[in-house]
Image: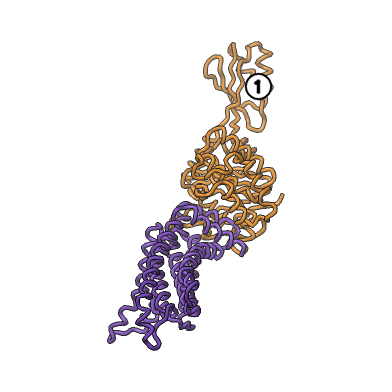
Chain colours: A purple, B orange
Amino acid sequence: MSMILTIASREFRTLFLSPMAWTILAILQFILAFLFLTQVEAFTELQPKLATIEGAPGLTDIIVPPLFGNAGIILLLVTPLLTMRLICEERRNKTLALLLSAPVSNIDIILGKYLGILGLMLLIIGLITLMPLSLLSGAELDLGKLFANILGLLLLVTAFAAIGLFMSCIAGHPTVAAMGTFGALLLLWILDWSVGMNDHRSELFEYLSILRHFQNIQSGLISTVDVSYFVLFTAAFIALSIRRLDNDRLQK
Amino acid sequence: MTTLIEADHLTRYYGTHCAVNNVSFTLAKGEVLGFLGSNGAGKTTTMQMLCGNLAPSAGQITINGYDLLDQPKAAKLSLGYLPDTPPLYKELTVQEFLLYCAGLHGIAKNSVNAAIERAQERCGLTDVADRLIANLSKGFQQRVGIAQAILHNPEVIVLDEPTVGLDPIQIREIRDLIRELGQDHGVILSTHILTEVQESCTHVQIIDQGRLILNETIAGLNRQMDTGTLQVATRLAPDIDSLLTIPGVSSIESITANRIIIHHSVTANPAEQIAALIIASGSGLLELTPVKRSMEDIFISLTKEHRDL
């Protein structure tokens, strides 16, 4: 366990030694703050009309789900860039030998790397959450719904990072890993679109679609089906990554 | 003598190409084993297998009593490895990097600083401890690699071409370090520089095309280098007939009138009697040199012999 934390903390700190993490945090925060302010603006305009409607959506409904939904899309673009170097670059720089000859198992290596990158993701989610929380100073929020959105985004990025880690394990070059992750994530995201065509409804595609599960949780409906989808997804790709690293020793 | 490494019938295939073929050897505490071979002979593959970076296709490796396959963590605890490219995170400083390595090897918190200080001192890194590894010269990077391998004071130290890219002074320092490490550890080093083996090793192995073709102590190798030939130069022409009567001398060749080559049996060295006889006869001894085969000769003749088979 301490080995996992050693690897994770190095991974996390190394991210901040290059401009990469800082740039991504800054750009992400800027774009999302812009979107957040647009939503707040929209709400203040709509407020008089909403007051007359029975059971109208509240402040939380108008601001939080779009914010977290957009954050999900932006993270879909950003995660491949963050995860592409995890294993791939160690292999290219031949530093993997250091980990492989140290008394750590492949499970430690993969989990350490994964937790390291997840640390940055948590930081991003934390910064995003601060925005709606700032409204608490002058308004009331539906904290349950906010929590559901945080949980949804958290599950989403754990899945994103797991698939990114796996791609980094199999790719020979970071760019290829990034392309692979981006392609896989985008496919899973848009898989749901075919569901719109009523005659060709596929329950399998509907289940596989990452967007559908995310939206279910976002709406405040935290069901075992959706949560276990993300947990299974993440666990599967972490297990595959460990397998892939084991294979490195067997054949080259 | 405690056996630190036992490699038993190691074989490794890359596809259909056999890189290492049925190699067995042992390493005991206090030994420095030199692994010699030309490029692509299988040195690095063997080292990678010893350090758990590569699984052997067949065979077994035991390190400090632990099987590398069954108890990898326990086995790797007593292992320090410098691969052919030093595994360095260039964005860290030397101090940070060694701190990370200490964490990986599970060095107890209270002894980490002492261990790092000692490794830096031994490898001459104290002055550059706070510099980024990326900004260091290749020689210093190589030293950081060695520091990383000896940091946790492992029983077995495996160094893959440790002196590549170093200047002559650094090479000498590293050789001294290796000899020093050899006193209370087991060290394996691979190289294709023959004098390096002569200078810093106690044992030597030559590997060629994946097969072990020589496994000798340095003393044994020195015996092999002894060809039983003496070159003698004198001021006046020596009396060849009387020289032939000295026990052990088998034949004498004259190159010039004043320079002869004496062949003798390898077991008895008649150099002393020859010198005494020449001086007594008053022909004036100018030079008496044993003719030795160089490491290169042995290496080339052994590999050639092996390939002809």
Kind of element beneath mark 1: loop
| Residue that appears at 49% across and 61% down | A250
Which residue carries the number 1 mark? B245
- Is A5 situated left or right of A79 in this image? right
Residue A49 or residue B190, whichever sits in front:
A49
Mark 1 surroundings within 10 Å by alpha-carbon count, few (fewer than 14), some (14 through 19), many (20 or more): few
The x and y percentages for residue B209 are 48, 48
Which corner quadrant of the image does residue A71 belong to?
Answer: bottom left
| Residue that appears at 40% across and 66% down | A32
The x and y percentages for residue B76 are 61, 57
- Is A128 situated left or right of B140 in this image? left
Residue A212 or residue A250, whichever sits in front:
A212
Residue A236 in view of the camera: no
Question: Please, which chain is the residue tagged with disc 1 on?
Answer: B
Residue B167, placed above or below residue A246: above
- Is B41 situated left or right of B222 in this image? left
Residue A20 in view of the camera: yes
Residue A90, placed above or below residue A110: above
Name, please, the residue furthest toward the right.
Answer: B1
Residue B176, placed above or below residue A30: above
| Residue that appears at 58% across and 30% down | B292
Which corner quadrant of the image does residue A77 belong to?
Answer: bottom left
Amino acid type, residue under disc 1 in the picture:
Thr
Query: How many callouts does the rendering have?
Result: 1
The x and y percentages for residue A228 are 48, 79
- Is B5 situated left or right of B296 in this image? right
Name, please, the residue furthest toward the front.
Answer: A48
The x and y percentages for residue A85 are 44, 58
